[in-house]
Image (cartoon, rainbow, N blue to C red):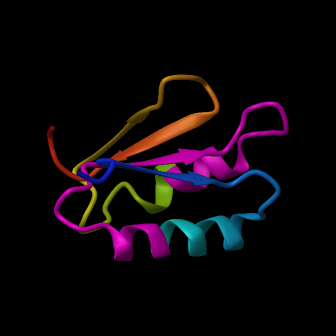
Amino acid sequence: MMNAIIEVDLHGLNVREAQEALDEALRNADQTVYRVRAVHGFNNGTALRDMIRAEYRWHMKVLRICPGPNRGQTDLVLREY
C-alpha cells in the first residue's frame, strides 16, 4: 500500500514556486492519499505558511487545513482517514 500522506518540501522556494509544487501534489493525489503535508519551515518568516492557508482554504480537493506535527508544517486534509 502506498503512503497515504504526500510530503512536499518547500524549503528554498519562493511563494510562486511553492504554489506550483503544491498544485502538482494535489493533481497527483489519488484516492489513497488523505493528506498533503507542506513542509515550509518557520525560521525564515511566514510567507509560505500564510500563502498555503489563504490559497488552499477553498481548494476543491481540500477538506480543511490544519497544523502539521510541528510548527514548520501545514497539512492539507483531503479526506478523513
Taking 5 as reference, is 61 above or below it? Answer: below
Residue positioned 38% across, 68% down in the render: 26
Taking 37 as reference, is 14 above or below it? Answer: below
Q: Is residue 39 left or right of residue 78?
A: right
Q: Is residue 22 left or right of residue 71?
A: left
Between 47 and 40, the one nearer to me in the picture: 40
Residue positioned 70% across, 72% down in the render: 17
Residue 31 point in image, percent of width and height = 16, 63
Between 32 and 57, the one nearer to me in the picture: 32
Q: Which residue reaches farthest front?
A: 1
Between 33 and 65, the one nearer to me in the picture: 33
Residue 15 point in image, percent of width and height = 70, 64
Residue 21 point in image, percent of width and height = 58, 70
Magenta stretch? Answer: 24-52
Count of all numbered marks drawn on residues in the image: 0
Taking 3 as reference, is 69 above or below it? Answer: above
Between 5 and 3, the one nearer to me in the picture: 3
Residue 42 covered by magenta stretch: yes
Q: Is residue 63 left or right of residue 44?
A: left
Residue positioned 69% across, 73% down in the render: 16
Taking 16 as reference, is 77 above or below it? Answer: above
Q: Quadrant of the C terminus?
A: top left
Residue 43 point in image, percent of width and height = 82, 31
Residue 43 covered by magenta stretch: yes
